[in-house]
């Protein structure tokens, strides 16, 4: 009889990465904002070394920009970046869904269904952050069920670049409601193991988020341009 191995503890470095990533994704740290190392060290009760290591990780994910003689700042969320990455993500998530239909176990579908119910509870309370966490766990569970490590590594390598946009899209009440309905169809299709439907559904799900973010970013850019020009800002509401 072998002794049970202790569960690995999350390292300090990983904790800082996760907390800093969450602050950027949720908008606590705004695009263009310089990362104040002294303040962040105090916030996380750490020295500069693990903080700087975490910042490098987030730079590789596209969430942080490192500028010589200036330091680290939150990377801007631009349409050019999203237009480049979202189609790739959509194709890869569609492939993951198709593979998952052939390889997923019943227990995994049941686990995804439980996550879906938990996500619905957060939606009913309009509690965005835990909703988003459940949402991402569902997408990750489908990816795991695809049983393709190369696909998983590629998708996760790109995920950081669109994570903010996925979160941002749910700030639109209309889009949020649509996303919840889409997730219900995703679960039903996964239960049916219908790869021909699930692949396009996942691609369209991500594409709809991009369109919501595209509209919001354009309005934001128009407001910024109007303010710089001293012109009155249009009263358009958020999408």
Image (tube, rainbow, N blue to C red):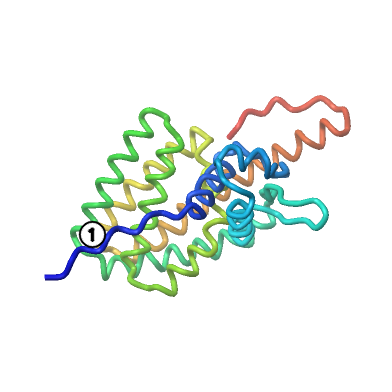
Viewer-side residue, 68 vs 78: 68
Q: Position of residue 62 (x, y in %)?
A: 63, 57
Whether residue 168 is visible, yes or no, is no
Q: Which residue is mark 1?
A: 192
Within 10 Å of disc 1 (Cα), the crowding (few <14, some 14-19, many 20+) is few
Viewer-side residue, 59 vs 80: 59
Q: Position of residue 111 (x, y in %)?
A: 24, 52
Q: Position of residue 238 (x, y in %)?
A: 60, 32
Q: Residue at x 73, y 43 (%)?
A: 34
Q: Is residue 230 left or right of residue 50?
A: right
Secondary structure state at the residue bearing disc 1? helix
Q: Residue at x 40, y 73 (%)?
A: 149
Q: Is residue 113 left or right of residue 238?
A: left
Q: Residue at x 32, y 46 (%)?
A: 184
Q: Examine the image and state in which quarter residue 192 appears.
A: bottom left
Residue found at the far right of this picture: 229
Whether residue 235 is visible, yes or no, is yes
Residue found at the far left of this picture: 1
Q: Is residue 97 left or right of residue 154?
A: left
Q: Examine the image and state in which quarter residue 37 appears.
A: top right
Q: Quadrant of the N terminus?
A: bottom left
Above or below residue 43? Residue 9 is below
Q: How many marks?
A: 1
Q: Is residue 18 left or right of residue 191?
A: right
Q: Quadrant of the C terminus?
A: top right
Q: Position of residue 150 (x, y in %)?
A: 44, 74
């Amino acid at each position: 009889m072998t002794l049970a191995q202790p569960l690995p503890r999350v390292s300090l470095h990983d904790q800082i990465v996760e907390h800093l990533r969450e602050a950027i994704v949720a908008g606590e740290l705004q695009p263009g904002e310089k990362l104040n190392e002294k303040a962040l060290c105090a916030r996380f009760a750490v020295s500069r070394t693990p903080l700087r290591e975490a910042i490098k990780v987030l730079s590789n994910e596209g969430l942080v920009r490192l500028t010589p003689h200036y330091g680290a700042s939150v990377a801007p969320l631009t349409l050019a970046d999203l237009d480049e990455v979202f189609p790739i993500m959509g194709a890869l998530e569609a492939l993951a869904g198709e593979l998952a239909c052939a390889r997923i176990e019943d227990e995994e579908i049941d686990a995804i269904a439980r996550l879906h119910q938990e996500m619905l509870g957060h939606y009913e309370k309009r509690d965005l952050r835990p909703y988003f966490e459940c949402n991402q766990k569902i997408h990750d569970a489908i990816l795991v069920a695809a049983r393709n490590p190369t696909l998983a590594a590629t998708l996760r390598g790109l995920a950081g670049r669109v994570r903010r946009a996925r979160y941002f899209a749910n700030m639109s009440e209309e889009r949020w409601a649509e996303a919840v309905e889409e997730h219900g169809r995703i679960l039903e299709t996964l239960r049916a193991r219908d790869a021909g439907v699930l692949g396009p559904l996942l691609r369209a799900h991500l594409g709809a988020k991009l369109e919501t973010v595209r509209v919001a970013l354009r309005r934001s850019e128009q407001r910024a341009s109007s303010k710089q020009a001293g012109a009155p800002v249009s009263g358009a509401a958020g999408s």
